[in-house]
Amino acid sequence: MTATSDSPLSNPQAFLLRLYRTAVQRAQPLHSMAAHLPPVPKGRTVVLGAGKAGGSMAQALEALWPLEAPLSGLIVTRYGHVPPRPEGLPRRLDVVEAAHPVPDAAGLAAAERILALTQGLTEDDLVLCLISGGGSALLTLPAEGLTLEEKQRINRALLESGAAIGEMNCVRKHLSRIKGGRLAAACAPARVVTLTISDVPGDDPSVIASGPTVPDATTCADALAILDRYRIEVPAAVRAALQAGGLETPKPGDACFDGHAVHMIATPQQSLEAAAEAARAAGIAAHILSDEIEGESREVGKVHAALARAVARHGQPFARPCVILSGGETTVTIRQRPPGSPKGRGGRAGEFCLGLAQALQGQEGVWAIAADTDGIDGVEDNAGARVSPDTLARAAAQGLRIGGYLDRNDAYGYFEALGDLVVTGPTNTNVNDFRALLIL
């Protein structure tokens, strides 16, 4: 292989960033929505939606839906995640912004408006639901007996507990008046077609944004067990309602889902495959581990490091040069800090990179990138971070001890000091974690 200005040999980090951008581009809704659109109905077409990709999904639908066919509705997305409107594109849908990952009053107001738009629908009407990751926090409508403030506290506790996304969304469904299939039930007797972008391991539509339009197989007892497992308190009246099954969700087989359809228009696997194709086109072998990797971010980083070291040292299980790709949704358990110690900053991708760098021990020939495909790692302004063979050496020269940053979950501070944050801004899509390791 001959090194050029943009080849993996001459600029490994630029090459890895190109793979990340390729993965993100594959997940843009305009590329894949048209094939999944239903015929124009006899009655109205009402569009409802929530998620980090909500703004771009709304614009894609506005561009693709026949101009002569009426179109109206409301979509809620995260603050700052509405893409610039293409010149000449008619505005046919309302898009509002709210907070993520902890819900706020704007999200509550949007959910109330969305539920109100289901009133008066007939069997001649079509409801198009645009659902993407992040919709669970953005579409917040607390169950009876639960205030927004209490919902916010429970959500923060779940985020810091280390609970898997499926566990978090099981609780969220049962503490909501709109998630867990309830939005679909409210749309009856209209037909509901859900177009979704997956951000969860396994692409289960009942987990994406807590499944507002699909049946929920989990139960109140499941939600209560998760709350107990992570020692998260809820008001006594809510606990009693869960114990009595009073907050149960619509189940598979419920007639309210008859005639409905769900179409997955973008998935993590598709984005990983696009990145793999780009790597192979550059002359680098590409191996996809999985699009469903879960677990503690730092521990997943250590496992990836062990694999990269085996390839670099022994040529096993893959020969060099190669790229190792993976996706999924890892978790970060917030550690208890000593009183007065600084609060850490960062998200899953950054914490993965901390664990990876620590375990690589400066291994020659290994570069890596980990970034969230929505462009935001946790609640910071970066998408993720980069790791190079000299990461630990450069940190040591500045007096930075990686163990201390791991102890306080401060990936942002560590990689900011090194100039190794990946900052892209919101990408207006979301197929979750993207990780790529280049071994030369």
Image (tube, rainbow, N blue to C red):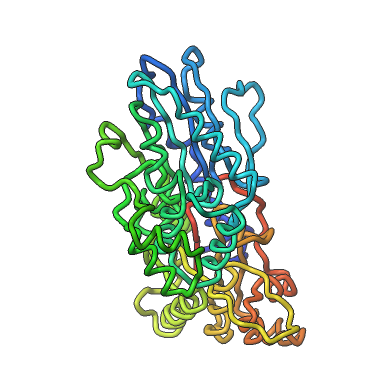
Q: Residue 375 location in percent, x, y?
A: 60, 54
- Residue nearest the observer in this picture, 379 or 319: 379
- Residue nearest the observer in this picture, 117 or 374: 117
Q: Is residue 374 left or right of residue 164?
A: right
Q: Residue 38 location in percent, x, y?
A: 36, 26
- Outermost residue toward the top in this view: 68
- Residue nearest the observer in this picture, 226 or 359: 226
Q: Residue at 53% of width from left, 28% of height from top?
A: 73
User: Which quadrant of the view contains residue 118?
Assistant: top left
- Residue nearest the observer in this picture, 355 or 71: 71
Tag count in the figure?
A: 0
Q: Residue 238 location in percent, x, y?
A: 46, 59
Q: Is residue 283 left or right of residue 56?
A: left
Answer whether residue 81 is visible to the viewer in this image.
yes
Q: Residue at 58% of width from left, 64% of height from top?
A: 156
Q: Is residue 439 left or right of residue 91?
A: left
Position above or below: 138 against 436: above
Q: Residue 125 location in percent, x, y?
A: 38, 21
Position above or below: 95 against 68: below
Answer whether residue 280 is visible to the viewer in this image.
no
Q: Residue at 61% of width from left, 21% of height from top?
A: 90
